[in-house]
Image (cartoon, grey):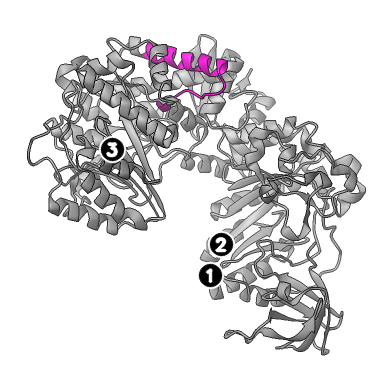
Amino acid sequence: MTLFTPLRTRLMSPDRALFVNDGGGFFRAGPDFLDRLSSNALSGSDRRFLIERGHGVDDTDPLGETAFLYNVAERLTLSGPLDYLILVPTLRCNLSCSYCQVSRAALDQKGYDWSDATLEAVLGMIDGLPGPRIKIEFQGGEPTLRPDLIRAVIDRAKRFQERQFVICTNLQQLEPELLALLDEPEMFISTSLDGDFDTHRRNRTEDADTTRAFRRNLATVVERYGPHKVSALPTIDPERPPQPDALIDAYLEFGLESIFLRPINYQGFARKRHASSREQDLAWRAYHEAFVRRLIERNWNDRSVVLEESYFSICLRRIFQPGADRHVDLRNPNPLGHDYVVIDHDGQVYPTDEARMLSRSGVIDLAIGDVHTGWDTPARATLNAHASNLRDPACQRCAYQPYCGRDVIDDIARYGRIDLPRHETEFCRRHLSLFDLAFRLIYDEDECTRYSLARWLRLEGMPVSFGEHWA
Amino acid sequence: MIPLNLSALAEPQPAFVTRLRRVRSETGKSDSVWIEGQGDSHLFAGRGGLVALEGADVVALDGDVILVDPERGRAERLLRAGSAHNTLLVTERCDQLCVMCSQPPKKTHDDRFALLEQACLLAEPEAMIGITGGEPTLYKHELLGMIERVHDARPDLGFHVLTNAQHFEEADVARLRKLAFRQVTWGIPLYAAEPELHDRIVGKPGAFARLMESFACLVRAGQRIELRTVLIQDNAAALPELARLVSARLRFVSAWSIMQLEHIGFARGRWRSLYVAHGEDFGPVGQAIDIARLHGIHARLFNFPLCSVPEPYRILAAPSISDWKRKYAPGCEGCRAQDHCCGFFEWHPDDALGGVTPL
């Protein structure tokens, strides 16, 4: 009877360690168990617990190995056919944010919109997709400067059974032609709301009139369509983050309950004007945790709304519900240029939106092809050769590997290379910190915490406990 | 209740399968076409000569695939047109003896595979056909052969096979990887995570261990598995632990159905010692669901009337009771949720119909 224990550990406190198996199942234990495990002195009940929970595989157990392999496989992304497009019909914008990640073009500049040939190629490409699902996100620039191009695309995508369109807009203008687009039932709105009036003006709109116009338009779309059709993200200057309550209230004012707390992205204009955004420090991590804890308090005090920090919820779901999430920024392997692509204003094709930003900044050309000739190219193959955390020596030892992802573009953006020891990268530090927080909350027996975790995990009820402790 | 058996008069001959039609259709070589009749008494003519049927109206019978047994003077409506709940019984023998069995097994076996196969070929397009017993895999090679042959002729059909999964073995893996078996869901009961408790409930020592072995074979063959757990007093408190087993080691199941007891078969006589009034204490069921759903398992409730389930969990309660055996309680009158509600089994005892609240 040989017991194989594919377990990795992470210290949670001086007398508590987290154990995670390769399939993502986990438990917490104390030093006594760790001693028994490391000195090969497991008791009968230890062995039973490990086998029954899938933390150990015994060669006399007929199902164990198959179940274990299934669980490991379930953690891996299986990239489906191309069904998610990020389209950039124009790079021009009517705002000029100091941290603009795409280095937008000015309103009157020529040559930053799709040409007729590019539009034709995009439509032809859409015609060739297998279906039956399609998701198209319109990015910019400010895509609503070209409602005609958006209309042409969504008309062409009518043949798909399941359609979802998202317009990422600054909502500065709400012309009738744009409203007619937003009226489409499959159309969703994604916008930026940096906080209260002054914060938003300081970061984005620069003057009070422009700020007022944005807020009026945001209120209009929320009222017209309901908050389910509108999402907003704040971009936060980590050097002076808003008070959590001020930010939450600014969102609730518009009925928005999900907040994707996003520090300035080290891209585009921000690389020069916000150079400190290359990496976040402990102060940011502490701010994030305080923010999440404040959400927990407020959710408990007022059950009529479920506030959440979107990215934290994504991390939480990756711990418990493999395969349930199609968030392309956190998955492993992270297939690039397969199930989703970005098509830029000039027809160039990028594997991610960040890759587009980086190329635009002139740091490195990460285009994998173009919409006319395709993107099954050596460039794409090169990126994919490194788009997994499975063989990374640091990740192999990390308890969070089954939940985590791999983002080569992020490494290139920050360090210009992808071969740094993983734990020296911002991606790694950020996710270690997020998963550490997740497990602190998972093992927090407080009812308020359990209530929020259950809502963030989209559960009907409220589990008595989220994680087991083995003494 | 919709009648499934009719009395039938036909010329003496071996049992045969035919499809009933009010009017002749172009693809009708297996059809029997309506000649005359009224009320519940009708005459059809077709491949078995004349058949006189009694017990259902011709409008209801139109399109049904029936098995006529002249010797016994009866006809069985094998595949009712337009019903999503058609089930073929392939044997009444079983090698388990579950305490709550809804269809207590018999010792003898009446081999009808050839007739059932003909019936499948006459099924409506894209039909999902249930296979049940007894234990269908006691005749595993006949069963797999039937599914393969039907798939060759009718790749549009799907099968849902209820099995105790005591008979799958390594040698089946290659065969089950064939295309035909992508159209199959295996509905497999598991009552507890503790082997002794499961074995006691199914009346067969070693059943739990054998089941785990079969699971390994089915998973490696890429088979779709629906796990089924009937709620009884013996396993109610053990449901949360079962949920942990499912979440850790049976993650491959496409669904886990927790089922309320059916007042039929053995459960009739043992009702008082088996039935759990979940409306009074939803605790262990709720906890089991919480654990399973936390871990992304598609848990759902079968045979739980909506109003008897705490509000947050209602979304998991399926209208699971087949149309032909569903009824509603007197207290259900005026309820606007009946379309989404399983209601009760026709044979649910009247004194257990209380406690409903119209929604």
> How busy is the neighbourhood of tag 1: few (under 14 within 10 Å), some, or many (20 plus)?
some
Q: Nearer the viewer, mark 1 or mark 3?
A: 1
- Res A252 visible: yes
> What amino acid is labelled 1 in the image?
Pro
**Marks 2, 3 in one chain:** no
Q: Mark 3 lies on which chain?
A: A
How much space separates mark 1 and mark 2, taking CA atoms?
Answer: 8 Å
Find residue A386 and name its label.
3
* Quadrant showing the N terminus of chain B: bottom right
> What amino acid is labelled 2 in the image?
Gln
- The reply to whether the magenta stretch includes residue A222 is no
Q: Nearer the viewer, mark 2 or mark 3?
A: 2
SS class, disc 2 = helix
Cβ–Cβ under 8 Å for marks 1 and 2: yes
> What amino acid is labelled 3 in the image?
His
Residue occupying the point 62% across, 26% down: A462
Q: Mark 1 points at which residue?
A: B155
Q: Which chain carries label 1?
A: B
Point out residue A71 in the picture as x, y percentages from the top left corner: 52, 40
Residue occupying the point 52% across, 32% down: A320
Work out whether mark 1 precedes mark 2 in sequence or the reverse, and give the earlier one. 1
The stretch in magenta equals: A285-311
Q: Name the residue under label 2.
A: B183
Figure check: A421 above or below B9: above
> How busy is the neighbourhood of tag 3: few (under 14 within 10 Å), some, or many (20 plus)?
some
* Quadrant showing the C terminus of chain B: top right
Residue occupying the point 52% across, 30% down: A457
Chief SS of the magenta region: helix
SS class, disc 3 = loop
Instruction: Depth check: give the residue in front, B188 or B325.
Output: B325
Q: Quadrant of residue B16?
A: bottom right
Q: In this view, does A40 lie to the left or right of A239?
A: right
